[in-house]
Image (cartoon, rainbow, N blue to C red):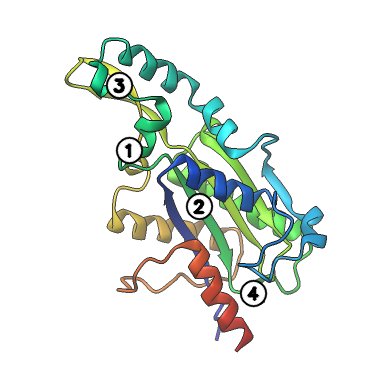
Amino acid sequence: MNLNYAIFRSEPIMTINDLAQIGSHNKREKKAYQSNPDIKLELTKDNIELVPLTEKYVKGFYNLTKEYKKEHNERMKTEREDRKKTFKQMLDRSNNVIADELMFTATNEFFKDMTRDDIKKWADTCMEFIYKDLGYKKEQVLHATVHLDEKTPHVHCLVVPLIKKYDKRTNNERYTISKKQYIRDKIHLSELQDKYHKRLTDKGYDLERGIKGSNRKHIKIKEYKRINRELEKK
């Protein structure tokens, strides 16, 4: 029986500090990773950059959202003094996502006989899903990488769902960051899981879809990796 599952997870990023920490991990900027002993830094050179980012995540984010920041700063000029916020303060206090981390992988056995080029082709299919099924534009992708320096290869893709949306109060379009524009709710996420699985199987990948309608609590990517390591050891 085939027990290789297609895995796609989405984790919201709520603050600039969280974004910085995730960037440090994804770009392997630390000298050691005590929280994840499976990372072999000597293999980091083999990681595949799908959408490269030369600067740090926070700087890249500010470059991507510079028009949004400019619009915010203009609005603050006419705001009451006690209500004025910097761009960072507005983002951190909005109780809304500033970015979304998408993670793609499969059970370890799936990658067993794959070459680096084979893994790259699989990862390119994941990116096709992001562009064609989720609907993100290339300029909304901050960074995407394949980690080959851990036991199970996986893709981390950081997207910024920056859009222009009609604002009834001002009768104008304004910039906003809205994950719901791309993943509306749990029902929509389940539909996207179906599309992701179909895109992979259409390319010839022999993978099962995850359990549909599962009541399992959505866990963070970091916690998911920890549980996965424990299962693989057993």
Report the residue marked by disc 3: 84
Kind of element beneath mark 2: strand
Q: Do the residues bearing badges 3 and 1 touch, measured as CB atoms within 8 Å?
A: no
The 10 Å Cα crowd at callout 3, few under 14, some 14 to 19, many 20 or more, is: some
Mark 4 or mark 1, which is nearer the start of the sequence?
A: 1
Q: Which residue is mark 1?
A: 93
Q: Is residue 47 above or below residue 164?
A: below
Tell me the CA gap for discs 2 and 4: 19 Å
Q: Where residue 77 appears, x then y in whole percent?
A: 32, 10
Disc 4 designates what residue? 108
The residue closer to the viewer here, 220 or 204, is 220
Judged left or right of residue 151, residue 99 is left
Q: Which mark is residue 68?
A: none
Q: Earlier in the sequence, mark 3 or mark 2?
A: 3
Q: Say which quadrant the C terminus sits in.
A: bottom right
Q: Residues within 10 Å of mark 4 (few under 14, many from 20)?
A: some
Query: Which structural element holds mark 1?
Result: helix
Q: Is residue 131 left or right of residue 78?
A: right
Instruction: Name the residue that disc number 2 marks.
Output: 102
User: Residue 39 vs residue 126: left or right?
Assistant: right
